[in-house]
Amino acid sequence: MNPAGNLSYDVFVNDPPPQDGLLPNGEPKRFSPMASTLIYGREDAVLTDPGLTEDQARVLGDWVAGHDRNVTDIFITHGHGDHWFAAGLLAERFGARVVATAGAIAQMQGGVATRPLLWDKLYTGIPPSPVTAVTVPGNRLTLEGHDLVMVEVGHTDSDDTSVLHVPDLGLVVAGDAIYNGVHMYLGQSAVGGFGPWRQAIDKVEALDPRHIVAGHQNKQLDDDAKRTIEQTRQYLDDADELLRTEDTALGYFNAKIERYPDYLGRLILWVTARALYGVREHPEGNPALIILNSWL
Ligand SMILES: [Zn+2]
């Protein structure tokens, strides 16, 4: 018997918003594709990480509406605005509640503070983004008798990140703990290194998923858990190696492209390189400010 019974999931990968400027190799700056997951039963559904802009909210919302389910909750994996600034529009359209862990909610408050210094400088059409997310007892939702468990995995691309584990589907919705065919945002590991992120990957692996939906993924690729976990670990190992062998941000940028020619999201690669080398080259500087400025 299929233990999932009436439970299914579907993934929508949104295109990045338009942006001005060029990368060092002459390509236009472009954010990464952003994935949202709809986990649904016969009547109800839970949506994850609904994106950044009004345009993204509209196309995602139309896709959700096509599933003809009652969206009860919208789960946010972590505080970065690309995962939730559009949550209010989706919550209003579907009459849904926004939920997250206490740690992620605190980080969302930080995301609101960062918004005028970063997001609004890069992208237009970001809707009002008050933090309306609430916690739920035990960090656990129930969808037609099935558990959806928020699992805290600590620091990955930011602090206090979490994933959604759906045991009956063998599914982890991994936010930015795991990537899939897209350059990883390592800027906020400039201080402290990748150890905490590796521990987070171990925590995801310990859930023994068959499927992983990465928050940033190439929609041509499957969601095989084993492959995405291995490739996320390898990407961090390669970053450590290149940080030893490359002397400049540009050298790191070019070397990563050579190793990962098919990976999407080279804006994030460039921002990452500027943050990692900026913090290294300015030990007297304020790391948070250097990391912020690496976007601008
Ligand atoms: Zn992200």
Image (cartoon, rainbow, N blue to C red):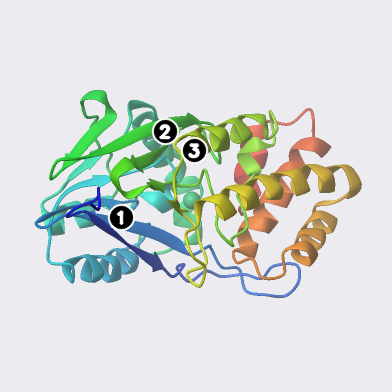
Which residue position is annotated with label 1? Answer: 86
Residue in the picture at 64% in, 52% down: 231
Residue in the picture at 29% in, 63% down: 57
Spot occupied by residue 37 in the image (x, y as percentages of width and height)? 33, 56
Q: Residues within 10 Å of mark 3 (few under 14, many from 20)?
A: many
Please, what is the three-letter code of the amino acid marked with disc 1? Ala
- How much space separates mark 3 and mark 1, taking CA atoms? 26 Å
Q: Residues within 10 Å of mark 2 (few under 14, many from 20)?
A: many
Which is more toward the observer, 151 or 95?
A: 151
Quadrant hosting residue 163:
top left
State yes or no: Cβ of the residue under disc 2 lies below 8 Å from any atom of ligand 1: no
Q: Secondary structure at mark 3?
A: helix
Dot 1 or dot 2: first in sequence order is: 1
- Is 125 situated above or below 278? below
Please, what is the three-letter code of the amino acid marked with disc 3? Val
Residue in the picture at 50% in, 46% down: 176
Number of the front mark, 2 or 3: 3
Residue in the picture at 83% in, 48% down: 242
- How much space separates mark 1 and mark 2, taking CA atoms? 16 Å
Dot 2 or dot 3: first in sequence order is: 2
Which is more toward the observer, 62 or 126?
A: 62
- Is 141 situated above or below 219? above
Which residue position is annotated with label 3? Answer: 204
Spot occupied by residue 128 in the image (x, y as percentages of width and height)? 28, 51
Quadrant hosting residue 77:
top left
Please, what is the three-letter code of the amino acid marked with disc 2? Gln
Spot occupied by residue 1 in the image (x, y as percentages of width and height)? 23, 52
Which residue position is annotated with label 2? Answer: 107
Q: Are marks 1 and 2 in contact (CB under 8 Å)?
A: no
